Structure formats: C-alpha cells, structure tokens
Amino acid sequence: MTRFLIVDDNVHLLGALKALLEEDGHQVAAFTDPTKALVALEGSVFDIVVTDLEMPQMRGDELGTKRWEELSDTDALTGLSNRRSFDRRLDLELSRTWRSGVESALVMIDLDKFKVLNDRFGHRAGDEVLRRVGSILNTEKRAGDLVVRYGGEEFAAILSDTTIGEAINWAERARQRIAACRIAWGASNLNVTASFGIAGATSWAVTKEQLIESADQMLYAAKGRGRNIVVPAPDPAKERPGAGPQHPRLHAA
C-alpha cells in the first residue's frame, strides 16, 4: 500500500483524485490548505506527494522546498537533528554564553564496540540499535536542548543553561537507560553501552573547535577507562581561562 499526500485548492479535483487512489487500495491524506499539509508532512511519512503548483496560501514548489529544508537538518535513520543543525546551534549557544555569561555544556556520546555488534548481527540490527539509542537520548532532552546524530555511532547533546554538574547528571541518566535497554532481534536480545565525554562553556568560553575537542578528549578518556562511563572535563567555572586541549582527536571502539 502506497501512502499519498495530495494538496490542491480545487476541492472537486482533490476529492476525485482521492477517491480514485483509495479505490486502488492506497492510503491518502488530502488537504486544500498547504500549511496544514506541511504539518502532516512533519508528523508522518508519505511515499508520494502530489501538489498543485499554484495555490493562494503557498506555491506547491514552496511546500516541497520547506519540507526539503526540514529534512536536510534531520538524520534519516534516527529522526534526530544532524551535524548541520549541530554546527549552527553550537555557534548560537556559544554566542549567547559569551554575551550573557550563562553556562552551557556539550556532551559527546559514542556507542561501545558497535562494530562488533554490526559484524555479528548485521547492519539492519545496528540500524535498529541506533534508532533506539537516538530515541532514548531524545526523550532525555529538555526544552532548549539539542540532541543530534553526530555521525556513525556517535551522538552529541548541546545542553543549554547547564552547569557541568547538571550535565553529568543528565549524561548518567542517559547512560543507565541505554545500558538497561534490550532490543529483541530474532532469537537474540541486543544490548549496547555508551561512553560519554562532557565539556562546559562559560562567559570566557573557548572557541567552538576547542569545546568540541575538549568533549572529544573526555570521550576518549571514557573509552580508555573501560567504557560505559561518563567523564567530564574540569569545570570551566573553576578554571582559569586558557588554551583548549592541544591533542589531536583520537578514536576508540
């Protein structure tokens, strides 16, 4: 069964096309108002979108452009925001921190031994694990936070108005939920753990690159200490301003 979204301000044409498609066994959502169609697009997945080009409220190609802009900021697998959203949001968050002095925190998250799981159970199982972890992290975020799929099996969270201590509590809750999660996969139950690295920003905050590097280094330290733990950088509110970490980014499974 194919899912259609139809948008046309001509009520009669819309009704006729809807009836024809439903008669063939397809599922159809039909709208005369393109703004309502856009809301439907945000909440559902459609296989085919059919839209009139000329409509009073919005051109059909504008509807497609708006949806494309939304998708370009979204990771297709997990539904989370993606790296593009992350870069833009972190710039804004640091700018706000520098102006107002409100603390914020960056959390880098990496699934432990994910390649082993992929090799044993296959990439479809790995994709399901990524979706489930993304869902857990997304439900943990608060108003004003941003959780993204950073790339591969790595995620990131930008925690607004958050001290290092609060970020540690947030990360610890998420870590425990991920470790406790069991995913039925055939005759097996998949489980995975994650390592967390945290860095904080203050009014004299380091650059975006230094903040990411600091959180990355703490993530690498978590891997080195046995995985499935949270490792924070020193609280920037208690440190003297200085240069950020100088080590190149390192990776561990």
Image: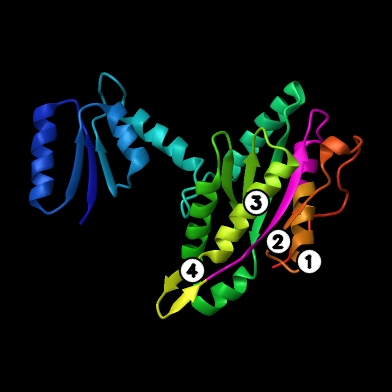
First reached walking from the N terminus: tag 1 or tag 4? 4
Q: In the shown orientation, is residue 189 left or right of residue 239?
A: left
Please state the horizontal and vertical placement of residue 28, each as a whole percent of the image: 18, 44
Frontmost residue, 92 versus 202: 202
- For the image shown, how many numbered marks are present on the structure? 4
Q: Which mark is residue 182?
A: 4
First reached walking from the N terminus: tag 4 or tag 3? 3
The quarter of the displayed image where residue 208 is located: top right
First reached walking from the N terminus: tag 2 or tag 4? 4
Please state the horizontal and vertical placement of residue 182, each as a whole percent of the image: 49, 68
Type of the residue with mark 2 = Ile
SS category of the residue bearing label 2: loop
Name the residue at 13% across, 47% down.
Answer: 21
Q: For the magenta stretch, what is the residue range?
A: 191-213
Q: Which residue is mark 2?
A: 229
The quarter of the displayed image where residue 223 is located: bottom right
Q: Which residue is mark 3?
A: 171
Please state the horizontal and vertical placement of residue 89, each as a whole percent of the image: 62, 34
Type of the residue with mark 4 = Arg
User: What whole-number distance in Å separates the C-alpha atoms at marks 1 and 4?
Assistant: 24 Å
For label 3, the crowd category at 10 Å Cα-Cα, with few meaning under 14, some 14 to 19 and many 20 or more, is many
User: What whole-number distance in Å separates the C-alpha atoms at marks 2 and 4?
Assistant: 19 Å
Q: Cβ–Cβ below 8 Å for labels 2 and 3?
A: no
